[in-house]
Image: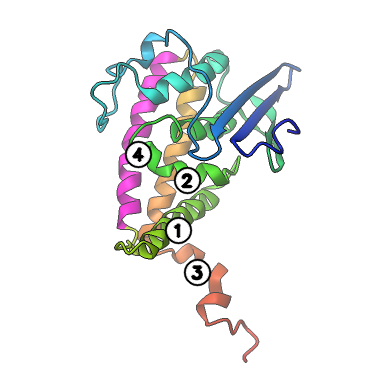
Amino acid sequence: MSDTTNDTSQLEFRYHFTFENGDQREFHIRLDGATLRLLNVSPSPPPAWTALEFSKCVNCPLQRESHCPIAVNLSSVIKEFEATQSYTNAKVMVETTERNYAKDTTVQRALSSIIGIIMVTSGCPIMDRLRPNVAFHLPFASPLETSYRSVAMYLTAQAIRKLRGEEPDWDMNGLVEIYEQVSKVNKGMARRIKQAMATDAGANAIVILHAFGDSVTILVETRLKELEGFFSTLLDGGKGNSGA
C-alpha cells in the first residue's frame, strides 16, 4: 500500500477477495490516524434497514439519531456481499500501511474482520470503547489472540488512569461489563443484518465476533489462567528455568 506508507494522518485497510471462480472484490477502510474514526463516505440516502428503530439494540443509548451509525457504515459491505453465501471460499489479501496479510478462508470469516473494524469506529457509544484495538488490528485473529489484545488494551488504559492519578481497575471488572454490553449490540446487529441480507454471510460474521467476545469474558473470569504459561519468565521474577 505504497500510496499511504508516509501518510500518518490516516490508517488504512484494503481487503481484496479472490474467489474460486476468478471473481474479485475489494473493500477499502480508511480511519483517522489520531482518533481512529471511520472516514469512509456513507451512502446517501441510507437504506431503510439502517433506521435506528429498525431492530434497535436493546441497550442502545442513542435517542436523537435517525439512523444507527454502525448500520449506515456497514451498508456498503452488506450490499457488496448480500448475494454471497457465508461458506463461500476465497483467498483474502489484507493490505495495511505496515504489512500485508493473506489467508484462504470463508467469506463469513473475512467479513467478521471487516465488520469488527467498522463496528468500533462508527460512533456507537457502546462499541467505541473497543476502538483502541483497531490501532493494532490483526486480520484473521484467533479467539486467544483477540482476547489477549482486548485484555492488553484494557490494562493499558488502567495504567494510563494510574499515571493520571485516577483509580485503575486492575481486576478488569469494567472489561467484563464492556463485553456484556457489546454482546447485546452484536445480537442486535445480527438480527438487523439478517433481515437486510438475502444470505447469511453478514449475520454469521457477527456471530463469529460474538463468540470472540465470549472468549474475552471467559479469559478474564478464569483469571487469565490460559495465559500464565506464556509469562513464566516474568512471573518468577525473571529467573527463568535456569535455576539461578
Q: Which mark is residue 228?
A: 3
- Magenta run includes residue 181: yes
Q: Does the magenta run of residues contain 81?
A: no
Type of amino acid at the residue the image marks with label 1: Thr
| SS at circle 3 | helix
Instruction: Find out whether the residues at labels 4 and 2 contact each other: C-beta distance under 8 Å.
Output: no
User: Is label 1 in a helix, a strand or a loop?
Assistant: helix
Q: Earlier in the sequence, mark 4 or mark 2?
A: 2
71 horizontally vs 81: left or right: left
Of mark 3 and mark 1, the one earlier in the sequence is: 1
**Distance between the Cα atoms at labels 4 and 2?**
18 Å
Do the CB atoms of the residues marked 1 and 2 lie less than 8 Å apart? yes
Q: Residues within 10 Å of mark 3 (few under 14, many from 20)?
A: few
Residue at (33%, 15%) from the top-left corner?
Answer: 51
The residue type indicated by label 2 comes to: Pro
Q: Which residue is under mark 1?
A: 156
Q: What amino acid type is highlighted by mark number 4? A: Ser
Mark 2 vs 3, N-terminal side? 2
Which residue in the structure is indicated by mark 2? 132
Which stretch appears magenta?
A: 173-196
Q: How many marks?
A: 4
Residue type at tag 3: Glu
- Per the image, label 4 sits on a secondary structure element best described as helix
Callout 2: helix, strand or loop?
A: helix
